[in-house]
Image (cartoon, rainbow, N blue to C red):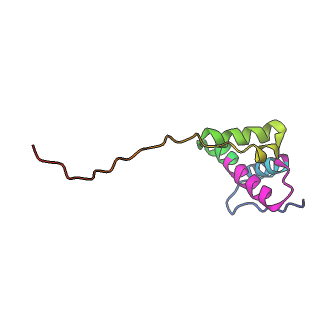
Amino acid sequence: MDIKLKPFLYELEQSFAMRKLFIEKYGPTNEKELTEAKRLAHIWVNFKFLGCIYPIPIMDQIQRVLDGNGQAQAQAQTQAPARKKVIRVRRTAPMKNA
């Protein structure tokens, strides 16, 4: 896939080079994967250069790409933990004052 990237308006050459490297390592084959690669690359650069903190599942996705698994992370999307079911009780009669 032919990937054409442009640096952001005030982006440093070093951070732009890191974003490109990350996207190449991801190895997108279609537009959907390219969009995901760009998103993760932007997050990774923010983490590296600005010290931003992100949720662990996102950092795990980035680590899989950096480890060389590239597109494998797209198929192995990290799922959110299961939410506990909340049971709500509805009152049918008004409460009496004591």
- Residue shown at 38% from the left, 47% from the top: 88
Q: Is residue 17 magenta?
A: no
Which residue occupies the foreground of this view, 6 or 77? 77
Which residue occupies the foreground of this view, 64 or 10? 64
Residue stretch in magenta? 25-43
Which residue occupies the foreground of this view, 44 or 37? 37
Location of the N terminus by quadrant is: bottom right
Which residue occupies the foreground of this view, 64 or 48? 64
Residue at the extreme front of the image, as rendered: 92
Q: Is residue 29 magenta?
A: yes
Q: Position of residue 46 (x, y in %)?
A: 65, 47
Q: Position of residue 28 (x, y in %)?
A: 84, 54
Q: Position of residue 56 (x, y in %)?
A: 62, 38
Residue at the extreme right of the image, as rendered: 1
Left or right: where 88 falls relative to 4: left
**Main SS type for the magenta part?**
helix
Left or right: where 70 falls relative to 79: right
Left or right: where 88 falls relative to 72: left
Location of the C terminus by quadrant is: top left
Above or below residue 54? Residue 13 is below
Number of marks in the rendered image? 0
Q: Position of residue 90 (x, y in %)?
A: 32, 51
Residue at the extreme top of the image, as rendered: 67
- Residue shown at 80% from the left, 36% from the top: 67
